[in-house]
Each structure stands twice: as structure tokens, then as C-alpha cells.
Amino acid sequence: MDLSCTEEEEAYRARLREWLAATLPGLPERPDPLDWPARRAYDCGWQRRLYDAGYADTHWDASPTQRLVFLEETERAGAPYVGANFVGLLHAGPTIAAEGTDAQRERWLPPVLRGDEVWCQGFSEPDAGSDLASLRTRAVRDGDAYVVTGQKIWTSHAEVADWCELLVRTDPEAPKHQGITWLAMPMDAPGITVRPLRTLAGSTEFAEVFLDEVRVPVANRVGEENDGWRVTMVTLSFERGTAFVGEVVACRRLLGELARTARKNGTWDDPVLRRRLGRLSAEFQALWRLTQANVSEAQATGGVPGAGGSVFKLHYSHARQELYDAAAAVLGPDALDLGREWNLDRLSSLSYTIAAGTSQIQRNIVAERILGLPKGR
Amino acid sequence: MDFRLTEDQRALRRGVRELLGRLFDREALRGAVDEPSLDRGLWRELGDAGFFALRLPEEEGGVGLGLPEAVLVFEEAGRVLLPGPLVATHLAAGAVPGAADGSVVVTSVDEDLVPWLDEADVVLGDVSGAVQVRSVDPLTPLHRVPGTGGATGAAEAALLTAAEQVGSAQATLDTAVSHARARSQFGQVIGGFQAVKHLCAGMLVRTELARAAVWAASVTGDAVEVAGAKLLADDAAVRNARDCLQVHGGMGFTWEADVHLHLKRAWVRAELRMPAARAEEAVAAGL
Ligand SMILES: Cc1cc2nc3c(=O)[nH]c(=O)nc-3n(C[C@H](O)[C@H](O)[C@H](O)COP(=O)(O)OP(=O)(O)OC[C@H]3O[C@@H](n4cnc5c(N)ncnc54)[C@H](O)[C@@H]3O)c2cc1C
């Protein structure tokens, strides 16, 4: 039960804190959420600054403790979030680091760290959502390339991505989990059509991606042919295990801001609301501790987060929605004004119990993989 | 940082689990329910095993361990529903003669309630005007004292009580899962029904969250973190017992099944040592 940082990690924290204090005031204005090229430029610009200052590798190279320190400090200082680099840094990146060849790591990881290349995730299909393994996008081997035809949906950041981590079916005869392959597809290849979809928050966070005989080099395959489901499980364990860690710190910061606003506008005098904020604060503190437990466990067992990520995600996604509901209670009628802070975030938070595996699917995972209850529908 | 248990801590937990399995098995539990009185022999054996002197320095005849270890021990106590004013006696070790070795039973006034007043040798706090109530928990006799609420205990008392709640939450989770694996309806085990599976998954999430909070608070000793841990642990113990009852069907509503004992004790612990209202206010004040 050791929660302490080494001297080295504390020195790292101090250095980072100083750098953030010096750097953040010089950042450009945050872009309009509807302007994707500007958002990409902003997010990549931030990543580039991290890279130049020597802080870019914290997502998969650094010790887990150092990574937590990084997330804690950047969030506490109000630094930009990963944004368009989410998939590259937290999803495809760690997967390639864990499962790729040396050449693949060499090719794909440095540009992600430098903020030069943006990735998106092409997993879900119109008929393969929760039942991801039933995906049908077909890849047929033709010489040194796969020829890919099919459709993906809900592909976040597809509009501005350079690469797509793509799941395809390479063996339609095999049982559904055994005929899948994980490919890195360049988004400028001929045959790709991206059609943005508007979310309930008004912006186009995700898109439909149509693939018509797109040629993807066999060299872009991560893992073996038809072994993509296993690779996918690695990817998803990163997504559920560590990708949301920084947001927990952000939520703790938001709670502090909420309390300040509530004290100013008088809602703090309402004991029901005050207690509600107290309970939420306890939950986010515990989520942070649960993260430290999960990271410690992953560190001890080889770096890939376990099913504990599902435990975390289940509670986190729910608590975050509650948090914005509490924010709305603090704002009162102002909660209806999208020009006020938190209100757009409240809309975005509605996706948290769906994206990266719905809460129902996470409960299935917890019940079957941790508690050993029988599989079944 | 390595938030996992150390080898020593794992060994301690194993040892305590074995010990309690011997000293207070299910038969002993049901016997105590039938004839609720404080078992002095058991109390002394707990004392001999270092249950109360756990955190006293070795020079003073203690075991010399810390709050994290105490939390693990109290988790095990909560798991088997070990009765008696365990927290009060543990906290009195070193201050009240005889508490450390289990020869003296210490209780205290807390939230205008006094558990085990008639059986205790030493009572901390003012018990004038104490009136016995018909305690909801057959294994925790209670008196009410006139007052305005408030606690005598420190944050440590809240934390150790929270640890017991986590142990109880784990016990009802385990019981629910083993019942769900064994009981069949409609030609399949009920654990295959998603409605039942999802109840169990929710129980696990509550338990893990509360445990992380309690363990961390035992390391930091931070008062706000302790309040938050108590809040989540109360929730886990009470709600897990409710869900465990539901998973057991009619059997869950019987006196014979242990689940009501967990629920009732969880209710008592939730009311003692910083109940929800004050814990929430304490955490809010930290914002
Ligand atoms: C904001 C956002 C961003 C996303 N970004 C990406 C991305 O970048 N790349 C990508 O590939 N995907 C992405 N997704 C897709 C996401 O992973 C899927 O939406 C999700 O897995 C659910 O699939 P579905 O939408 O088809 O819903 P369905 O699977 O049709 O589910 C509908 C409902 O049925 C329930 N259900 C389904 N199966 C079961 C079951 N076995 N047991 C119990 N209940 C069940 C679900 O819980 C849900 O409530 C994103 C989604 C959102 C909302």
C-alpha cells in the first residue's frame, strides 16, 4: 500500500509544474469546437510542445507512476487535453508499442509523440457495435496488400486523421472471433470516403467511413493475420484501463470550481446540493485511488491493464454524468445556456456510458471475467 | 508507488482470516445470534492474537503495525461479522489498562449511541440517561443517550468502521455470487441471467471503489479522505447486503440466511462513527 513518489518522481513533478506555469500562458486561444482543422492544429501544437520539452513519452514509455504524475499535474494546471491525439496516444500507440514489430514502432510512434500524425479508431460498424466481433468489413489478400471493402461508423476524429486502426475480417469461414485482423490504414488511400456525423452536442465528433477496395499494405498489419481479436483486447484494455485517468483529475478540478461558483451564487447554502457535491467529491477521490490500484496491478503484471479497467469505467462514466447534473443544479436556469461553461460538456458526457463499450457490456465483462458467472444472453 | 499489498500485508490478511475462521466460524456466529452476549473467551483470544494491540509499539507489548494493517484486520472482522465493540477497544489499547490484551472490554458513546453498554467494563463518554433500545441488529445491543449527536472517536474510528463495512460488502458479494452459481431456475443457473449478473457486477464495483478509498485513507490519514471512505464503505455494505438479499429470493428474507445479519450490522455501522450526512458535509467542506 505504498502511495509515495520517489525523489526522482518528485523532482519530475516539480520540473513539470514549473514548465507548465511558464508555458500555459503562452498558448493560443482555444479553437472553436466546430472547426476541426483548427482543433487538430491546436491539439497537435500542444503535443509538439510536450515533445520538445521532453514530456511526450509519458503515455507509454514512462513508469506508470510518472504517467500518473504527468496526468495529475497537467490537469491540475488546466493544460489542454489530448483531444485529437486520443487514439494515437492512448489507444493505437500503446497497442503498437505492445504488439508491433520494431519497424512498426519506429514508423508510427515518433510521429504520434511529436504531434505530427493523428489516428482514428475504425472498430464499430453499423451492424457491429456491442457485438464488435461480428464485424464484416472484408479484407482480401492481393499480393503484398489487403484489399478492404466495407463500412465503419462512429469513427471519432476521422475527418482529420492520418491513420486509422482498422479491424477487418480476413477469414469469413472461421468462428467470428478468429477471423479478424488489426491493420493500420492510411486515411489518404484511394477508396476512402468520410461522411461526418453530427452529435447531439452539435459538433461532428465522429463520422461514417466507407471503404471501397482500399489497398492496405500487409506490412501495416499489427499481430498475425486472424489474430486481431487478441490485439483488439489489448487495445480495449488500454482504453478502459488508462485512457480516462486524466479525466478523473479534471473532474476533481471541476468539483472545486463548482464549489466556488456555488459559494458565490448562494446555492452552497442548500445542504442537499452541498452534500451532493460532497458525495461526488468522495467518489472521484476514490476513483483516483482505484486508478492507482489498477496501475499498480498492471505494472506488476506486464503493463497491460486488466479487467479492473471495466470496474473503473463503469463507475467513472456514471459519476461523470452525475457531476454535470450537479453542475446544472448549481447553475439553475443558466444550465440551459450553451454559452455558459459546463453545459456543452454536460451534453458530451451523455456518451460516456456508451462509447468504449456500454455500461451493460462492462457489467457483462465484470460478471463473467472477474466473478466467473456463466456467459449467456 | 505500488498500491498493492506487500508480502507481509498479504500474510497478515491470510493469518487473520485463518484465525477468525477458527475463533468465529459460522456456527459461532449463529450461536451468538441465538444467545447474544459478549464472549469473554473470544475477546481474550483476540487480545492474545494482537487484535487490539496491533498498533501499539513493540516496547509497550504491541505488535507495532500501522493503520494500513489495522484496516486489513478490521476488513476480515467485518467479513465474518465479528461482534463486540472492536473499534473502541482497539483504540483504547495503551490508554485503558487491559484493553490491549483483551482482558477489558471498552465501549464508547458515539452519535448518541452506545453499543454493548451492559457488557463493557469501561465506557468512554457520558452515559447518564442512557436508555436501552430494541436494537435492529441482534448482535449489537444499543443504548441511546440524550445529546445532540457528534462523535467522540477520531477519524481512525471512522476508518476502522469503514474497513469492517468493506469486509461485509465483500462477504455479501461472495455469498451472492456463489448462490447465483448454484441455484437453478428455468433450466439454468440464475447467474446466467443478465439481471442477476448485473446486480453482482454492481456489487463488485461498489466494493472495489470503497476498498480503494479505505486503503488509501489508511495510508494518507487525511481526514477528508477518511470521511469519503466511510461514505463509500457504508454505501457498499448496505447496498450489497440489499442486492445479496435480492439474489437469494425468498431464502434471503429468512432469519436462517446470514444476509440480514450483514444488512443490520451495516445499518448500525453506518449510523455510528460519522454517518452519511456528516461525512458528506466533511468532504464538501474540503472543496
Ligand atoms: C461519442 C462516441 C465516440 C465513439 N467513437 C468511436 C470510435 O472512434 N471508433 C469506434 O470504432 N467506435 C466508436 N464509438 C462506438 C461505440 O463503441 C459503440 O457505440 C458502442 O460500442 C455501442 O455500440 P452500438 O452503438 O452499436 O450500440 P448497440 O450495441 O446496438 O447497443 C444498444 C443498446 O443495447 C445494449 N446491448 C447490446 N448488447 C447487449 C448485451 N449483450 N447485453 C446487454 N445489453 C446489450 C447496449 O448496452 C445499448 O444500451 C463511439 C461512440 C460514441 C457514442
Image (cartoon, helix red, strand yellow):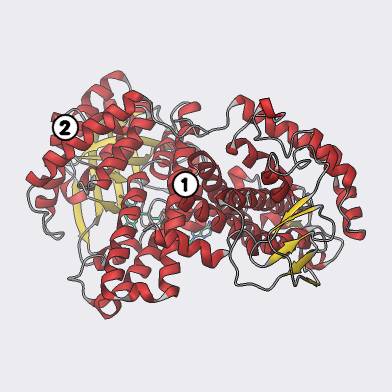
Give the amino acid type for the residue marked by disc 2 in the picture.
Arg
Q: Position of residue B5 (x, y in %)?
A: 57, 32
Q: Which mark is residue A114?
A: 2
Is residue B22 placed above or below B80 in the rendered structure?
A: above
Is residue B84 placed above or below B18 in the rendered structure?
A: below
Image quadrant in which the N terminus of chain B is located: top left
SS of the residue at dot 2?
helix
Chain letter for the residue marked with disc 1 in the picture: B
Image quadrant in which the C terminus of chain B is located: bottom left
Q: Say if mark 1 contacts mark 2, CB within 8 Å.
A: no
Question: Seen from this angle, which residue lies furthest top?
Answer: A102
Q: Is residue A200 left or right of residue B29?
A: left
Q: Position of residue B250 (x, y in %)?
A: 80, 68
Q: How far apart are the alpha carbons under marks 1 and 2?
A: 40 Å
Instruction: Give the image quarter of residue B230.
Output: bottom right
> Pointer 1: what residue?
B222
Q: Residue at x 67, y 25 (%)?
A: B59
Is residue A375 placed above or below B254 in the rendered structure?
A: above
Q: Position of residue A122 (x, y in %)?
A: 31, 46
Instruction: Give the image quarter of residue A94.
Output: top left
Give the amino acid type for the residue marked by disc 1 in the picture.
Asp
Question: Seen from this angle, which residue lies furthest bottom?
Answer: A333
User: Can I make out residue A363 in this image?
Assistant: yes
Q: Position of residue A349 (x, y in %)?
A: 34, 61
Q: Nearer the viewer, residue B50 or A200?
A: B50
